[in-house]
Image: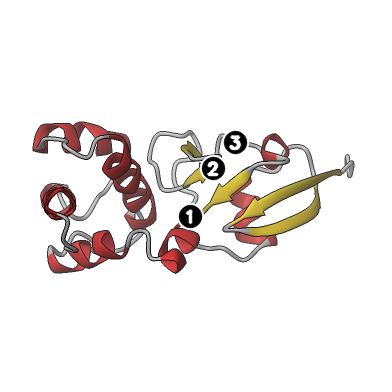
């Protein structure tokens, strides 16, 4: 058994972290097991479901496809970090209002994707919202409520009011 470890320094949700990790440790495993950040989930472990989505240096990545050692020196934001800063407060409230979450397994990935969309395409159409979140699987909601919630927040942010 190979027990070689590598030192990594990662800023997670604004907090500097220094750890020894095995080179094969996936970022989502590091976040969940080493740091206790359980918001991102392991779903398919192939990068197609979106449940493991986190933000690295401002861009969403699949935590199951990214190795912790690849993020050495990076800034990583998780759903916990976005929640704590209030960045997605309106989005979370809209998800609740529209019942856009049921079992909750996909919710963190959906919120991460929606947050990225709100920044990247603040004038997105309903069809563009559907396309943007199409890389995230949800087995419970049928996506309609998720799209409704995201569209509500897009409209309210364009009008300059909180959803």
Residue at mark 3: 66
User: What is the distance, in whole Å, between disc 1 and disc 3 at their CAs?
Assistant: 13 Å
Above or below residue 104? Residue 29 is above
Depth check: 132 or 22 in front? 132
- The reply to whether discs 3 and 2 touch (Cβ–Cβ < 8 Å) is yes
Q: Which image quadrant is residue 104 in?
A: bottom left
Q: Residue beneath label 2, please?
A: 63
Asked whether 113 or 134 is in front, the reply is 113
Helix, strand or loop at label 2? It is loop
Percent coordinates x, y for residue 103 in the rendering: 29, 64
- Relative placement, left or right, of 93 versus 115 is left
Crowding at label 3, few (<14), some or many (≥20) Cα neighbours within 10 Å? some
* The one of 79 and 160 positioned closer to us in this rendering: 160
CA gap, disc 1 and disc 2 = 8 Å
Residue 105: x %, y % from top left: 36, 58
Mark 2 neighbour density, 10 Å: few (under 14) some (14–19) many (20 or more): many
**Residue drawn where x is 79% and y is 54% of the image:** 18
Classify the position of the C terminus by image quarter. Answer: bottom left
Q: Residue furthest front?
A: 160
Instruction: Tell me what residue is drawn at x 50 percent, y 49 percent.
Output: 42
Q: Give the quadrant of the N terminus.
A: top right
Examine the rendered structure and indicate whether residue 158 appears above or below residue 62. Answer: below
The residue drawn where x is 60% and y is 36% is: 66
Residue at image x 31%, y 41%?
119
Q: Which mark is residue 49?
A: none
Q: Are marks 1 and 3 in contact (CB under 8 Å)?
A: no
Mark closer to the chain start, 1 or 2: 1
- Label located before the other in sequence (1 or 3): 1
In contact (CB < 8 Å): disc 1 and disc 2: yes
């Amino acid at each position: 058994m190979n027990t070689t470890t590598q030192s990594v320094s990662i800023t997670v949700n604004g907090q500097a972290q220094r750890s020894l990790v095995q080179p094969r440790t996936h970022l989502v495993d590091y976040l969940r097991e080493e740091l206790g950040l359980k918001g991102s989930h392991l779903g398919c472990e192939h990068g197609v479901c979106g449940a493991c989505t986190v933000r690295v240096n401002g861009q969403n990545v699949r935590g199951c496809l990214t190795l912790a050692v690849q993020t050495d020196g990076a800034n990583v934001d998780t759903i916990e970090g976005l929640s704590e800063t209030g960045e997605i407060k309106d989005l979370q409230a809209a998800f609740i209002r529209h019942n856009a979450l049921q079992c909750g397994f996909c919710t963190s990935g959906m919120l991460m994707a929606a947050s990225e969309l709100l920044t990247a395409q603040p004038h997105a159409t309903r069809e563009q919202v559907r396309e943007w979140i199409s890389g995230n699987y949800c087995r419970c909601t049928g996506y309609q409520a998720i799209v409704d919630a995201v569209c509500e927040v897009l409209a309210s942010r364009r009008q300059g009011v909180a959803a």
